[in-house]
């Protein structure tokens, strides 16, 4: 979905390096999410944010941090990357106040930690 | 706690035949249910959702899903499969009454449509 963009699309890094993945959206949605996808495990929620001042841990937040710089921007950081953080990372957005909370996903960032 | 199970890692179907991708869920209250599709090297795309009301939900690309409360299932169906339907399909659930806005996804089912 072109309304949700992620940068970079691919990244190879080394163990111990700090990495930031960025997400921007033009959908005007208040809620933003970070997931990781691993083969055979589906998607797991890392962090989510309902507005700039409301950030919450998801299922697997250890080793990750986030920053909501503006309504449209939500960044995910790996302070000290490790090989088991190699995965496909997705950002998603949804509309505040919509009870069904349909989420719309970005194209993903493929991260490899050597 | 909420959970989703997709019992089949892979489903193979011949082009033109009907397809079904299975999903069962567990919630403490009433569910919101979703299907998403992921094409190679792409993000997830929303297909359809069940909120309330009619148990048969119609979505994008000719897909539909049937909500069955007694069997706690939400199977995805299409009457006639296309080769272009080959992709990874994810079922997701949110418990309406849990006070949480988190979606829980299944592990995904790879659909292969054989020409």
Image (cartoon, rainbow, N blue to C red):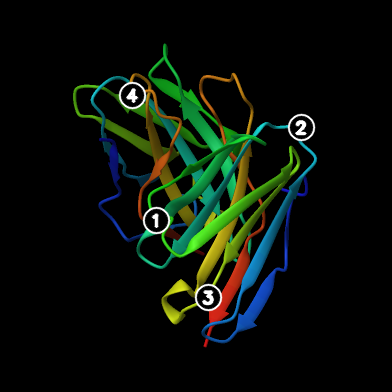
Circle 3: is it few (<14), some (14-19), or many (20+) Cα within 10 Å? some
Write down the chain letter for disc 3: A
Do callouts 4 and 2 mark residues in contact (Cβ within 8 Å)? no
Circle 4: is it few (<14), some (14-19), or many (20+) Cα within 10 Å? some
| Residue under label 3 | A80
Q: Is residue A11 above or below residue B86?
A: below
Q: Which of B55 and B83 is in front in this view?
A: B55
Checking the image for residue B98, the label placed there is 4
Q: Which mark lies nearer to you, 2 or 3?
A: 3
Write down the chain letter for disc 2: A
| Residue under label 1 | A60
Q: Position of residue A94 (x, y in %)?
A: 62, 33
Residues flagged by tags 3 and 4 on a common chain: no
Q: Which residue is drawn at 32% across and 61% down?
A: B9
| Residue under label 2 | A28
Alpha carbons under labels 3 and 1: distance apart: 16 Å
Q: Which residue is drawn at 59% across and 53% down?
A: A66
Q: In this view, does A73 lie above or below B115?
A: above
């Amino acid at each position: 979905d072109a309304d949700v963009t992620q940068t970079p699309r691919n990244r190879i890094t080394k163990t111990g390096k700090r990495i930031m993945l960025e997400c921007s959206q033009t959908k005007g949605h208040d809620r933003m999410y970070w997931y990781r996808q691993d083969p055979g495990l589906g998607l797991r929620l890392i962090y989510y944010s309902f507005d700039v001042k409301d950030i919450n841990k998801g299922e697997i937040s250890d080793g990750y941090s986030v920053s909501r710089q503006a309504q449209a921007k939500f960044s995910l950081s790996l302070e000290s990357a490790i090989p088991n953080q190699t995965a496909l990372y997705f950002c998603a957005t949804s509309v505040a106040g919509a009870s069904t909370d349909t989420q719309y996903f970005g194209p993903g960032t493929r991260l490899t930690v050597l | 706690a909420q959970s989703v199970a997709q019992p089949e890692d892979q489903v193979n179907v011949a082009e033109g035949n009907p397809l079904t991708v299975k999903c069962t869920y567990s919630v403490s209250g009433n569910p919101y249910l979703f299907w998403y599709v992921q094409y190679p090297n792409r993000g997830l795309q929303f297909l359809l959702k069940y909120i309330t009301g009619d148990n048969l939900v119609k979505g994008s690309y000719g897909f539909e899903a049937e909500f069955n409360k007694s069997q706690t299932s939400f199977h995805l169906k299409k009457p006639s499969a296309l080769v272009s339907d080959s992709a990874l399909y994810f079922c997701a659930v949110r418990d309406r009454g849990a006070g949480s806005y988190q979606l829980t996804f299944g592990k995904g089912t790879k659909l292969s449509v054989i020409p």
